[in-house]
């Protein structure tokens, strides 16, 4: 997968596609939305994905604060991947579409950095009153 584009994005949707774009990322997010999974479970649920690609995508999603990786202090080691809690909150599709549309309209033409857009994407997916989503 290509690396992140340098500089700023045209709008928030542009950044969102960059963060979750790719052949497998949406499928990974789909499975993690159901419940937390271990690496091997995800590999079995996504036939055709290689270990290298799955590990790479999970690492990228973790770096982008979309996926949480929890390491348990056990022998043998156990790691579970899950969506950030604020991304699991449900809202009506209409409300979410309106929020994304408003956010994209406000962001377009202003170009901004990836960290600022990540925070904006999290705000779009979360309720604004949640302290956990703003951290």
Image (cartoon, rainbow, N blue to C red):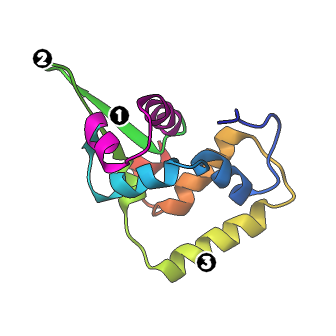
> Residue 116 placed where, x, y %?
67, 44
Residue 71 to residue 66: above or below = above
**Which mark sits nearer the N-terminus, 1 or 2?**
1
Which residue is tagged 3? 98
Is 103 in front, or is 52? 52
Magenta span: 39-62
Residue 41 lies in magenta, yes or no? yes
Between 48 and 61, the one nearer to me in the picture? 48
Pointer 2 local density, CA inside 10 Å: few below 14, some 14–19, many at least 20:
few
Give x and y (percent) for residue 61: 50, 40
Q: Which residue lies under the disc numbered 2?
A: 75
Q: From the top left corner, tell me how far across and down residue 27 is, in percent.
A: 45, 54
The answer to whether 66 appears left or right of 120 in the picture is left
Query: How many numbered marks appear?
Result: 3
Q: Mark 1 and mark 3 in contact (Cβ < 8 Å)?
A: no
User: Is residue 125 shown above or below 56?
Assistant: below
At horizontal 76% and vertical 65% (from top left) the residue drawn is: 106
């Amino acid at each position: 997968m290509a690396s992140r584009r340098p500089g700023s994005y045209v709008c928030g949707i542009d950044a969102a596609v960059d963060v979750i774009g790719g052949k497998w990322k949406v499928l990974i997010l789909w499975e993690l939305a159901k419940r937390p999974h271990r690496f091997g479970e995800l590999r079995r649920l996504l036939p055709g994905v290689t270990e290298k690609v799955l590990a790479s995508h999970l690492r990228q999603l973790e770096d982008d604060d979309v996926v949480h990786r929890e390491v348990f202090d056990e022998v043998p080691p156990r790691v579970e991947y899950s969506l950030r809690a604020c991304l699991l909150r449900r809202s009506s599709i209409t409300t979410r579409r309106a929020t994304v549309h408003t956010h994209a309209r406000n962001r377009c033409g202003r170009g901004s950095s990836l960290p600022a857009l990540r925070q904006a994407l999290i705000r779009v997916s979360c309720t604004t009153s949640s302290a956990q989503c703003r951290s």
